[in-house]
Image (cartoon, rainbow, N blue to C red):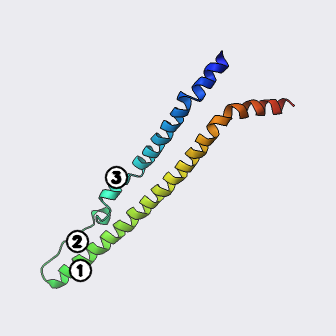
Amino acid sequence: MLAYEFLRWWYGPGWSGVIRNLQRRIHTLGEAFSVGILLRTLFAPWRRIVTYPGVGIGPRLRAMGDNLVSRCIGFLVRLLVLIAAAVSAVALLILGLVQLAAWPVLPAAAIGLIAWGLL
């Protein structure tokens, strides 16, 4: 009776729990990398470093160049973090799919490994 209940859980709520767990891990990964914030601020200056223009054409051009460099650095850093988040999400998804594929055979594998160990 206990084995029946275990298998009923394993192939029912247990399997759907694995899917929900995978979804939660991918969502947590997105939160850890702050993907939403990075996408919203992709073209923002790096660390809010902004040069304010002075009087005259020279200081204005220098401020424009400084601000452009700050935005380019901010874009590159945020883009690299977004790429790292995407690579991590793909790796997590692949591992989750391997886990989902292995889930149905794990009870039989456990019994087989125990039997093999007794030989």
3D distance between C-alphas at marks 2 and 1 = 8 Å
Q: Report the disc number at residue 62.
A: 1
Residue 71 as seen in the image, left or right of residue 95: left
The span from disc 3 to disc 2 (Cα, nearest Å) is 27 Å
What is the x, y in percent for residue 27? 43, 44
Q: Which of the marked residues, 3 or 1, is nearer the chain's N terminus?
A: 3
Residue under label 3, please give it. Answer: 36
Q: Nearer the viewer, residue 19 or 66?
A: 19
Residue positioned most to the right: 119
- For the residues bearing labels 2 and 1, Cβ distance under 8 angstroms: yes
Relative to 9, does residue 62 appear above or below in the rendering?
below
- Residue type at numbered disc 2: Thr
- Residue 51 disc label: 2
The answer to which of marks 2 and 1 sits earlier in the sequence is 2
What residue is shown at x 51% (from left), y 33% (from top)?
Answer: 16
Which one is in front in this view, the residue at disc 3 or the one at disc 1?
Answer: 3
Q: Report the amino acid beneath label 3.
A: Gly
Residue 104 coordinates in the image, percent (x, y): 64, 35
Count the marks: 3
**Horizontal placement of 72 versus 24: left or right?**
left
User: Residue at horizontal 47%, vertical 58%?
Assistant: 84
Residue lying at 67% horizontally and 36% vertically, measured from the top left: 105
Q: Residue furthest left?
A: 55
In primary-sequence order, the first of circles 3 and 2 is 3
- Category of crowding for the residue at label 1, using alpha-carbon neighbours closer than 10 angstroms: few (below 14), some (14–19), many (at least 20): some
Q: Secondary structure at mark 3?
A: helix
Quadrant housing the N terminus: top right
Query: Which of the 4 quarters of the picture holds residue 83?
Result: bottom left
